[in-house]
Amino acid sequence: MRIDILSCVPDLLHSPLNHSILKRAQQKKLLEVFVHNLRDYSLDKHKSVDDYPFGGGAGMVLTAPPLAHAINSLCQNILYDEIIFLTPDGETFNQKMANQLSLKQNLLLIAGHYKGIDQRIRDKYITKEISIGDYVLSGGELPALILVDAIGRLIPGVLGDETSALSDSFQNILLDAPCYTRPAIFEGLKVPEILLSGDHQKIEEWRLNQSIEKTQKLRPDLYAEWEKSELS
């Protein structure tokens, strides 16, 4: 899988992409991530990429010419399954979306900055708009990294244990069950006896019940969705 990220502040992206699971995924050639500096596609000598919005108002907007130049240049060599703009007013990112995107071959992520990007770029080039939540950040770089991490770990062979991603929270709508490791007793608190029993069927039943109870308590919206799916 290949993911390209277009940003006007690319230095924000390099460190997270070169550590831990994402680093190993790239070393294994299972995932390729390329970061592109939007200023390299600027059409003026000052390498400018932003301007004041028409109609007035606070803030700056990423202009259309360098964005269009960058997208067209990249599309000359790569057929993208999706060109994604990270924006607070996009569709909220979730595990189902991560699963779907992990099946794609090539993704282009556009990290906005300042007040966003010229609407004409959104109208002409963007195929999908994604938000990571109902709040505003300084730019789309952190959301882009979240997408890369969430998608990349789902690629077969990236995680050491192939079943690990499948048991994560949200994969079956429910939150994950509590986890414990050694020592069996810590500051007077004991690991639940069932986890020490060796009875895998009963352990799985316990984990499911714990997931249901946890979801009902912490995320009643997800619990209602799960309950509906169980009845259908």
Image (cartoon, rainbow, N blue to C red):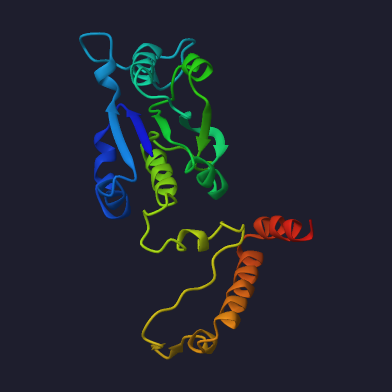
Question: In the rendered picture of this protein, how many numbered marks are placed on residues?
Answer: 0
Figure quadrant of residue 187? bottom left
Residue 29 quadrant: top left
Q: Nearer the viewer, residue 74 or 16?
A: 74
Q: Residue at x 26, y 20 (%)?
A: 39
The spot of residue 4 in percent (x, y) is 35, 32
Q: How far across and how far down the image is residue 210, in percent?
A: 60, 74
Is residue 143 or residue 5 the one in the foreground?
Answer: 5
- Relative to 109, 132 lies left or right: right
Q: Position of residue 35 (x, y in %)?
A: 29, 32
Image position of 103 with respect to 86: above or below: below
Depth order, front residue of 164/190 = 164
Q: Which residue is at 27% across, 32% downward?
A: 10
Camera-side residue: 111 or 201? 201
Image quarter hosting the C terminus:
bottom right
> In the orientation shown, which residue stands out farthest toward the left?
45
Looking at this rendering, what residue extends furthest in the right direction? 231
Residue 148: give x, y in percent of width and height: 39, 43
Which residue appears at 47% of the width and 43% of the height?
102
Q: Quadrant of the N terminus?
A: top left
177 to 113, vertically: above or below:
below
Q: Classify 139 as above or below 157.
A: above
Q: Residue at x 36, y 62 (%)?
A: 160
Give the answer, above or below, for where 32 lies relative to 40: below
